[in-house]
Amino acid sequence: MSRRVLVPALCLLALLWCLPAPAPAETRQVFAHLFTVPTDGAGGTDAAARMPAFEAWLVASFGGYTRLGSGGGGWKNEAGQVEIEGNTAYLATADRDVSKEIAARLVADFGERVPYVLVFPAGLFAK
């Protein structure tokens, strides 16, 4: 390689070497909460009328939510009988474990006897 090409190439490499590297994304600890909301309220009432207020509470309390979709499931009740119900799955994150708050709201708003709320630690990438 000739000196006319080598010197500018080395200068260019030196300049590129001096450029700052992109900073790694910062992470912070959050807690992910996965829970189900029944589509039928206690006593056969329609839970759809309560959903807007519940979702507004999720936004006000935790900054938002993700509605994962409709599904269904069954569980063994206190008497040992299997109960089948339709539900909607949700995901919400917070900077602490708020599963008891979510469970209390499910009991109060939807008449859930045994709320299903999973919580697990997660990392959130932030700028």
Image (cartoon, rainbow, N blue to C red):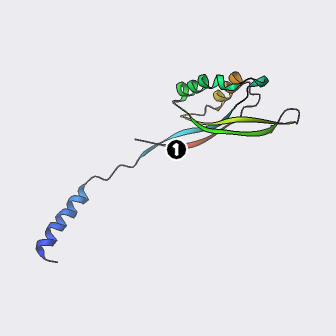
Marker count (numbered)? 1
Left or right: residue 13 versus residue 47 is left
Q: Amino acid at mark 1?
A: Gly
SS of the residue at dot 1? Answer: strand
Residue at 12%, 74% in the rendered image: 3
Residue farthest toward the bottom in the current orientation of the protein: 1
Where's residue 25, x and y in %?
A: 41, 47
- Front one among 1 and 123: 1
Where's residue 114, x and y in %?
A: 76, 31
Looking at the rendered image, the quarter that the C terminus falls into is top left
Up the image or down, 72 lies above or below 42; here it is below
Residue at 25%, 54% in the rendered image: 19
Quadrant position of residue 9: bottom left
Looking at the rendered image, the quarter that the N terminus falls into is bottom left
The residue at which mark 1 appears reads as 123
Up the image or down, 114 lies above or below 10; here it is above
User: For the residue carrying disc 1, how many other residues have a C-alpha within 10 Å: few (<14), some (14-19), or many (20+)?
Assistant: few
Quadrant position of residue 92: top right
Residue at 68%, 27% in the rendered image: 106
